[in-house]
Every structure is written in structure tokens, then in C-alpha cells.
Image (spheres, rainbow, N blue to C red):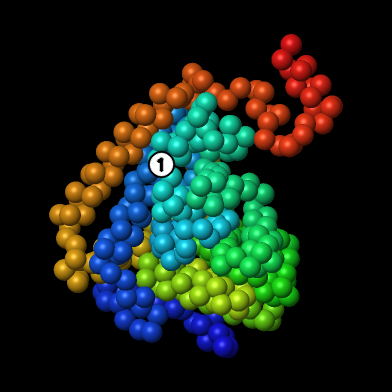
Amino acid sequence: KDTTKHAEGLIRVLDDEGVASGAWNPNLSADELRLGLEQMCRLRIFDDRMMKMQRTGKLSFYMRSLGEEAIAISQTMALQEHDWLFPTYRQPGCQFVRGRSMVSMINHCIGNVEDNVKGRQMPVHYTYKDGHYISVSSPVGTQFSQAVGVAMASAYKGEDQATITWIGDGASAEGDYHYAVNFASVFKPPVILCVVNNQWAISTHRNFASGGENFATRALPYGIPSLRVDGNDFLALYSATQWARKRASAGMGATHIEILTYRTGAHSSSDDASRYRPADDHEHWPGGDPIERLKNHLILTDEWSEERHSELEQKLDEEVVAAYKEAVTHGDLANGPWPPASTIFTEVYEEVPWHIQEQREELGK
């Protein structure tokens, strides 16, 4: 069907008062909504604690998902467990949905001996094989074309397996975005291509990323159905992703989604956002806060309360603190132990070439 009106408009389910309505309402159960709220809160509290660790010298670097928690949590919940995830550094919450432990994630952020990446990546550039969560790429945008390739492979093998990927509004100006969309248009793989329009590419406003009115309409000339979704609306995100997943499963090809949201925090722990925007800028974002919106909806339907919410936040904070204490038993930033230097030669070649073997032996002398 023609999705032009959905690409030019904005799909919302939750209004400003917390009422859910409209054709896109996924009608999730109260248990599913409470789980989604818990996972979003878990991600925010985890981020807050890790940022404090960075500020006190216990982590070298960190990036938060503040204001964008609904994206990773809601969209991953809407998918099947065996679907592939090609994230950016703003979707670590996918791993909570897929069952990764906080201890494992913190081990990576520290870069200690239990880091599953063995110190080869920056903090927050996670990978989680059991959760089909592909390694976050520092060169922004590369995951878009990679995701299309994996989706094409799934189609060739006849598997009911979808792939979802995300890219920022700034990175959508990279060639990888257009390569991916063009391949998806031609080969029609089961892929969901998401552009997270959080208004900022570090310090560059989204107006410099594209000359078009929005990002959703960019996919229409390629012949790919495209939606524009309120990224702070847990229900709208779930429904749009579920719709795209059903299309993929039916062999109908790719779906393109612009996710309209706001990067509430700085780009990273190395960024000072006050240098290029007012400190209270996020408070004027009309989309509100994703956690508050879902919380208010649950309270409105008598499925939640402020007291229960406070208890949840306390429980989650204790969970994060306990996870950090366990993680540092495997090594901290200042004292290690860290992955040995010999790991630079492992897990690259199935059969190690002779010249690499010589270098490996030289290192050991």
C-alpha cells in the first residue's frame, strides 16, 4: 500500500494525557506494558550509574540513551528472539530485552579480563552473540548496509528471520545509508531500516543532514514503504515495528521508519552540549519523556502507581550497584586485570597466516 501519508505525518498512539487510541494501538497486555516500563527504567538507571562511574574515573568513556529508551526496548520487544539487531551506540537496551546480564555489560565498559570483546572496542560498543546483537560500529552508518546483507542471506536460506538496524539523522548523510536503501529496494530482503532523528549529530542540528522536510519520505522514491513514528511513544513504536516485521515475514521486503525523538543528554561523556544548545532545550520537546508517558498511561488505566514506580526505581538502582560491584571483581579500570596483548591475534583468522604467527611468537619473547 501507499504509505505516503504515514511518511509525511506522524504515527502516535499515546496522547499528551496518556490515553491510548487509534488504529495503531497494539493493545498490549498490562503485563507487557509493565515489562516495557521496567526495561526502560532499567536502561535509564544503568546509564545514570555508568555516567557517574565515568565522571569519577572508573570508566574511560560512556554514552547514554537518555530520552531514547523506548526505541531499543519497544522495538526489540516487538520482534522475534531470533531476529538480527544491528544497533548504534544508542540502542544498548536491546540487550536487556534479549537477556544479557548487567555484569557482562559492565565488564565490557571497563575493558577487564571478562570483557567479551577483549578490550578491542570502545566502551558502549557492545556485541552480544547469544542475543543476535551485532557489534556496534564506531564508523557511523556502516551497519545499515551490513544489515541488508544479512537480511538477504536470511531470505536466500528461506528462514523466517528479520533484521532491524538503526542509524542517526546525521549518519543518514553517509553513503552507506543510500547503498543500503538501494539494495533493499532491489532485492526486497526482510529488513527494517530505522533512522533515529534525535535532532542532533553531536553538535550539528538535523537541518544540516538533509534538505528534505523529513527523513521518512526519502525512502519513498526507492519504492520502499516508509513510516514516521513518535519515538517517545512506546506503543506507537511497538505497533510500527510489529507491522514491519509482519511484512518481512510475508516476503514483502523492507520497511523504512523515521523515529522522531530528542537526544536529551550530551552526545557522550566527552561532549559539552551547553556549548551549542540551551541547557533546558529538551524540556521544550513536544514529545515528552518516554518513561513518563508510559508510566502515566499505566496509572491512568489503574495498572500502576507512583508508589510502585518509586519501589521499582529503588530495586533497579540496587541491581545496578550490585552488578558493578561484581564486575570489578574481574578487574577495574585502574588496576586490571585486562585482556592479554596476545588476544590481538585471536578470533580473526580460522587458520593463522605464517606472518601473523611470526608476529605472535615475537610478541611472546
Q: Residue furthest front?
A: 158
Answer above or below: position of 275 versus 188: above
Count neighbours of disc 1 (C-alpha within 10 A) and say few if under 14, some if 14 to 19, many if 20 or more.
few
Q: Residue at image x 40%, y 80%?
A: 24
Quarter of the picture holding the C terminus: top right
Q: Residue at image x 49%, y 25%?
A: 333
Q: Residue at image x 58%, y 32%?
A: 118
Which amino acid, by three-letter code, is at mark 1? Ser
Location of residue 345 (image quadrant): top right
Location of residue 127 (image quadrant): top right
Answer above or below: position of 104 versus 16: above
Is residue 177 shown left or right of residue 310? right
Is residue 40 shown left or right of residue 159? left
Secondary element at image label 1: loop
Q: Nearer the viewer, residue 197 or 266?
A: 197
Where is residue 218? Give x, y as percent: 64, 76
Quarter of the picture holding the N terminus: bottom right
Where is residue 257? Give x, y as percent: 54, 72
Is residue 57 shown left or right of residue 346? left
The residue that disc 1 covers is 101
Residue 285 visible in the current orientation: no
Residue 220 visible in the current orientation: yes
Where is residue 119? Give x, y as percent: 58, 32
How many marks the image carries: the answer is 1
Q: Residue at image x 60%, y 79%?
A: 252
Q: Nearer the viewer, residue 113 or 275?
A: 113
